[in-house]
Amino acid sequence: MRLLYIVHRVPFPPNKGDKIRTYNVLRHLARRHEVHVATLIDDPEDLAFLSELEQIAESVVSARIDGRIRKLLSLRAIFHSESVTVRHFYDIGLQRKVDELIGSKNIDAVVCSSSPTAEYLLRSKHWDSRLKSCPKIMDLIDVDSLKWQQYAERSTGPRRWVYRYEARHLQRYEAFIYNEFDQLFLVSEQEKRCFPGGDPEGKIHGLSNGVDLEYFSPAVSARPQSQPPTIVFTGMMDYWPNIEGVRWFVTSVLPLIQRTLPEARLMVVGGRPTSEVLKWGAMDNITVTGFVDDIREFIAEADVCVAPLQIARGIQNKVLEAMAMGKAVVSTPYALEGIGATPNVHALVASDADQFAESVTRLLRDSGDAQSIGKAARQFVEQRFSWSHNLSLMDAVIEKAVSSGESDARCDVTPGGDQIG
């Protein structure tokens, strides 16, 4: 089968949420199909990774945008009552390349990743011709309009107005995608239930992430036992939800832990730390690493991994990776929601600073308890988060949509291709 896969960022390296998913989807699809990739490049460092994609895909087309300048220019969308996000990720140069691919290849189906990529089909010169009968599949991943609404609720002043604006217009765009695309995916059943307007046509599927269980393994080097009790957070540190979550942990939770365990230290592991994040590294018992070559070494060093996020959508890969490595995780309810783990069995869940500090302290003081939870966590992800098993749902949806010969094909399938009665 010949597929066109449109992504809004280069799906390599798989070191952050959207790239982890798009990379694994691409690799999975390319094992069975001829895949042509169209991608934007909003980070100049990603230019170096196009060769990695070319080893996986049949062909790769791309277009560069300046992410920083584009953020400012995209605000013009407000004057046209359009989504800022959609305008940010649209480039006429990439549109031409997408149209050329559609025109020159006998594409059997198009898979788009993240809502802004829909624009490359909706604005295509082939929309009323070749694309009319071609199955169109959207992997929304998360309900992004709800993320912007969460941002608005935690902001003030002009930012709050802009975030509310984007939440409203992106929600309208998501509803438009629902009407124009044949099948849609969201990262979990919980996220599926949040979709604006519901799913009256039964064409949204919960397609969970996975985790590389061989790479993220408890067998990765154990930490030296001479080190002090170590708490680890992992994540890109220019991303607002991560910054806000760690800020809360540093100011409200860590001091409570250190009343009982003054030697306890926090390691903040992730690329692109902002100036605020870097300042935390000057505080006693806090290390800010910046980019690291192998995040597993730091997870392996942890006595406890934390996910203190106050804003979260979908599935947190940082939590899955820690669980896969057999680490005890303390999380807010938001960060654990899409994973479906059982509180107090596979992870500890805490809603406020006192509960969070108490849970972390308990695990730091009782290594047996931490190991027991970590072992249960590893078993849980082994059972639920295999990429190959979860992505078999995408195979079933694509194959049924193409074999039906109709772009508006509908199917009810579960991973493995089993029909729902």
Image (cartoon, rainbow, N blue to C red):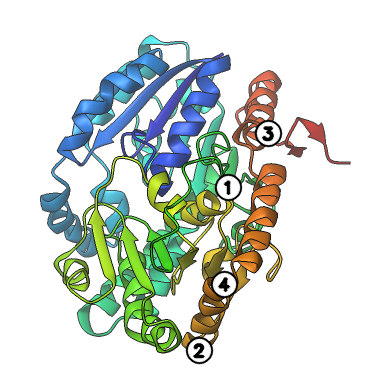
The x, y position of residue 103, in whole percent, is 37, 14
Residue at the spot of label 1: 324
In the image, what residue type sits under mark 4? Leu
**Considering only vertical position in the picture, is 219 above or below 330?**
above
Sequence order check, earlier mark of 4 and 3:
4
Q: Residue furthest front?
A: 226
Sequence order check, earlier mark of 2 and 4:
2
Q: Do callouts 1 and 4 mark residues in contact (Cβ within 8 Å)? A: no
Q: Residue furthest right?
A: 421
Residue at the spot of label 4: 363
- Classify the position of the N terminus by image quarter: top right
Sequence order check, earlier mark of 1 and 2:
1
In the image, what residue type sits under mark 3? His
Label 1 vs label 2: CA separation?
27 Å
Sequence order check, earlier mark of 3 and 2:
2
Q: Do callouts 3 and 2 mark residues in contact (Cβ within 8 Å)? A: no
Label 1 vs label 4: CA separation?
18 Å
Camera-nearest residue between 333 and 178: 333
Label 2 vs label 4: CA separation?
14 Å
Sequence order check, earlier mark of 1 and 3:
1
Residue count near mark 3 (Cα–Cα under 10 Å), binned few <14, some 14–19, many ≥20: some
In the image, what residue type sits under mark 1? Ala
Point out the frontmost of discs 1 and 4: 4
The x, y position of residue 166, in whole percent, is 33, 65
Tell me, yes or no, if residue 201 can be seen here. no
Q: Residue at x 47, y 27 (%)?
A: 26
Tell me, yes or no, if residue 12 can be seen here. yes
Q: Secondary structure at mark 2?
A: helix
Q: Is residue 253 left or right of residue 278?
A: right
Camera-nearest residue between 29 and 419: 29
